[in-house]
Structures are given as C-alpha cells and as structure tokens.
Image: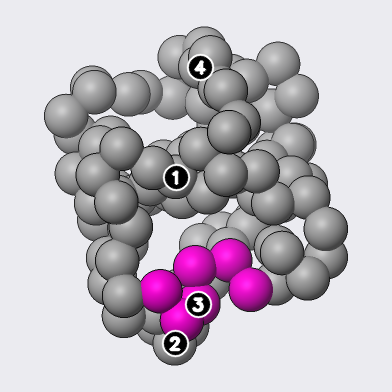
Amino acid sequence: MIKAESFLDRAKGLLGSNNLAESSGLWLVPCKSIHTFFMKFTIDVIFINSNSVVLGLYSKLPPYRLTKTFWSAHSAIELPAGVIQHTLTKIGHHLRIQAA
C-alpha cells in the first residue's frame, strides 16, 4: 500500500497508470471524495474514518466517475477492482492498514 499524503501525490493519484497490481493500493490521506476522470481502468474505493472504520464503499468504480463526499472520512483507499467483493468488506468493518 502506497501512502499519498502530499497535495501533489494525492492530486496525481493513479492518473497515468495503466493498472493497479493485484496486491497493491493507494491510500489517500486526507481524502473525503475521489474521481476517476482520465483513468484507464476500474477500481474499488474504500472511505475510512480516523479509526480505520469503513464509512463508504465503491465496488468496481469505472473511469470518469465521481464519488459522493464522505464528510467524516479521514482517508480513501484505492484498490484493484474486485477486492471489496473478494474480501467481503462492509460498512462498519475495522481495517488494519500498513503503508509500504
């Protein structure tokens, strides 16, 4: 998991990438909403609060979409499409996140 904390790192996000490796992700801190404008692939997105509790989920979010704003979110995690379904992640779950 790559942690993006600077304004530039968060603004760039996954733009310009052709895919997201199966075992990787991008942790955007802070973050209350994301967009997939100009992206080339579908992703899963998880919004969490400061205690790493899941507040919102977007499974298989395609390019050129905008999420709603999660006002109480601390951060967002962008993952390969299908991870949410595979891990059975639900709103209210507590995540353990480890940045590389």
Check the image and report above or below for 16 versus 98: below
The mark closer to the camera, 3 or 2, is 3
SS state under label 3: loop
Q: Which residue is mark 1?
A: 25
Q: Amino acid at mark 1?
A: Gly
Residue 89, horizontal then vertical, whole percent: 32, 24
Q: Amino acid at mark 2?
A: Phe
Q: Residue at x 78, y 50 (%)?
A: 5
Instruction: Rate crowding at label 4 as few (under 14), some (14 to 19) or many (20 or more) other CA atoms within 10 Å.
Output: few
Disc number placed over residue 95 in the picture, else none? 4
Corner quadrant of residue 19:
bottom left
Asked whether the beta carbons under mark 3 and mark 2 sit within 8 Å of each other, the answer is yes
Label 2 vs label 4: CA separation? 29 Å
The mark closer to the camera, 4 or 1, is 1
Residue 22, horizontal then vertical, whole percent: 24, 44
Label 1 vs label 3: CA separation? 13 Å
Check the image and report above or below for 44 versus 23: below
Please report whichever mark, 1 or 3, sits nearer to the chain's N-terminal start: 3
